[in-house]
Image (tube, rainbow, N blue to C red):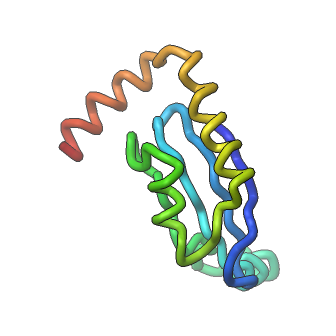
Amino acid sequence: MSRHTIDPINLNYSVVVGYDNPYRSFFANVHDKGIEAQLDNDPELDADPIIIRLGDRYDAIKTVAELKEKLADYAIISPETQQLLQADLEASAYYSATPLQKSMELLSKKVFG
């Protein structure tokens, strides 16, 4: 799995993007820095700092362009990061699907169609 931190549009957020080979999907997580700071001060606090999760299921986001579009309200993916993400996808092609990935693919097709 790759992981790249990119600049958010709203500076109160942090944004991470990447490619998850087991899920065969690009992903993005947008974190609220304010909630993360509150959790640092009070670990008992019942709050989730992740305000958006993209690509958190099998085969959810297949292209960099699709990820870019879905993340547009939160961050702009630079051309350099787009190239890195595409390279991450291409590098994953050198690895054959694991038995777990094959099982996840079958399960996902049954559940999500």
Q: Percent from the top left, x then y, of residue 44?
A: 67, 77
Count of number-bearing discs:
0
Rendered position, 15 above or below 57: below
* Quarter of image, res 12: bottom right
Q: Percent from the top left, x then y, of residue 95?
A: 56, 17
* Residue depicted at x 68% and y 84%: 10
**Side of 104 relative to 86 (left or right):** left
* Residue depicted at x 33% and y 30%: 105
The N terminus is located in which quarter? top right
* Quarter of image, res 107: top left
* Residue depicted at x 67% and y 44%: 83
Q: Percent from the top left, x then y, of residue 112?
A: 23, 46
**Side of 90 relative to 3 (left or right):** left
**Side of 42 relative to 111 (left or right):** right
The C terminus is located in which quarter? top left
Q: Percent from the top left, x then y, of residue 110?
A: 19, 37
* Residue depicted at x 54% and y 22%: 93
Rendered position, 61 above or below 23: below
Rendered position, 44 above or below 77: below
* Quarter of image, res 75: bottom right
